[in-house]
Image (cartoon, rainbow, N blue to C red):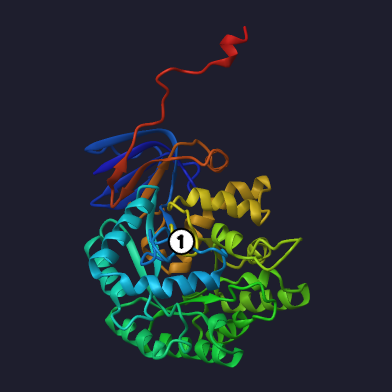
Amino acid sequence: MKKFTHALIYGQHEEASEILVDKGVIKQIGKNLPKADEEVDLRGRLVVPPYVDAHLHLDYVYTGGGAGAKNASGTLFEGIARWHDVKKTQTLEDARERALKGIQEEVSKGVQFIRTHIDVDDPRLTGLKAMLEIREQIKDQVTIQIVAFPQEGMYAYKGGDEMIEEALKMGADCVGAIPHFEWAREIGEKSIHRTVELAVKYDKLIDVHCDETDDVMSRFVELLNALVMAEGIGTRTAASHTCSFGSADNAYAFRMMRLFQQSGMNFISLPTENAYLQGRQDSYPKRRGLTRVKELLEDGINVCFGQDSINDPWYPVGNGNLMNILDNGIHLAQTMSFEELDKCLDLITTNGAKTLNVQDQYGIEEGKPANFLVLDAKTPFEAVRQRADVLASIRHGEYLFKRPEPRYEIGLDLFARAK
């Protein structure tokens, strides 16, 4: 057995300071626990559940600087057009190498759970084949969910719906869609109906790129919510982006939030990506592209944040650091009261796990896998204020990595100089 001592445990165990681990599982949480074969002193550092990146595109990573990939307008739609050409050049080995590099970058910053959308509007299904292989090979180090995502449309791309179904048969975990990119509203609605049909048929989760536009009349989230509520699968469904909902009038928004409460549908907001992509046709005031994060949270609706892109045709930067995503998100959503700051880590931890439906294997609780992070902070507030580094990532009770606390070779002491 192994015991982690002098921990400040985030969430429900703030009075406890020790975690006892046996065979990779949390056996006990508390104080003055029985002695163990190995004891690890965490020196009062904050312990949190692993970061969850609920929305990423691992088949796109590190393609943003290549020939023909640079997005001059900075819009979603040019990004899709650029990717149409770029993906024709990728090989299985290239897709695998880039995806592994992206996963490594995320895991090195504390992520242990990733939901990745993989473009299946590709007759070769190159990205999907690479990701299915990777998911199995590194499952002990990181949990990966795969969304069968039709980047160029379920119907706008000929045979797109068939490619999605094939991807589900091959092992994809979730059904994806992009209704606002279809050629007409009615076709977008058709894609939502088909998404739900496939999810029910194959017992899959749902994650839809939904209303990622500034067009306030893009309201596919309404149909998605109604259909999954009717099927009783709201908690197994996520609406990603929902940018237009951030521009909707209050009468519509408040009516819909009541229905979202009833369905239990999850929302994924991508703060940095949509702040960059949206509002491109606006003069001023210029919209920042976020959905109604604050209001959704206040109504008890589950919301989480994700990275979305790492250097691809949509977004030139990104490095898998969810603390950066959190920092941007709480600023843009204006969720920074002291009460909100004390619990906003949920947006990149427990709320993401709920969205991925992995609660049975997630969280710092007795009987759960011993998966957690040690942050270079002593309170949740300080972790957020300082964008605290991850000092250690622990998976099944063993270190995925451990780094020393930052230190200066030559210390700075202005107080001494001012005497």
Return the residue found at the far top: 419
Q: Quadrant of residue 52?
A: bottom left
Q: Amino acid at mark 1?
A: Ser
- Helix, strand or loop at label 1? It is loop
Seen from the viewer's position, the closer of residues 11 and 133 is: 133
Q: Is residue 210 above or below residue 162?
A: above
Residue 266 in view of the camera = no
* Left or right, residue 293 beside residue 165: right
Residue 252 is situated, as x and y percent measured from the top left of the image, at: 74, 78
Instruction: Name the residue: 50% across, 35% down.
Output: 378
Q: Which residue position holds label 1? A: 309
Residue 381 is situated, as x and y percent measured from the top left of the image, at: 58, 41
Instruction: Name the residue: 59% across, 46% down.
Output: 342
Q: Quadrant of residue 223?
A: bottom right
Q: Is residue 79 above or below residue 61?
A: below
Residue 161 is situated, as x and y percent measured from the top left of the image, at: 41, 89
Q: Is residue 59 above or below residue 226?
A: above
Q: Quadrant of the N terminus?
A: top left
Q: Quadrant of the C terminus?
A: top right
* Left or right, residue 116 beside residue 301: left
Circle 1: is it few (<14), some (14-19), or many (20+) Cα within 10 Å?
A: many
Residue 290 is situated, as x and y percent measured from the top left of the image, at: 63, 63
Instruction: Name the residue: 64% across, 64% down.
Output: 289
* Left or right, residue 81 beside residue 146: right
Residue 307 in view of the camera = yes
Seen from the viewer's position, the closer of residues 10 and 184 is: 184
Instruction: Name the residue: 25% across, 60% down.
Output: 138
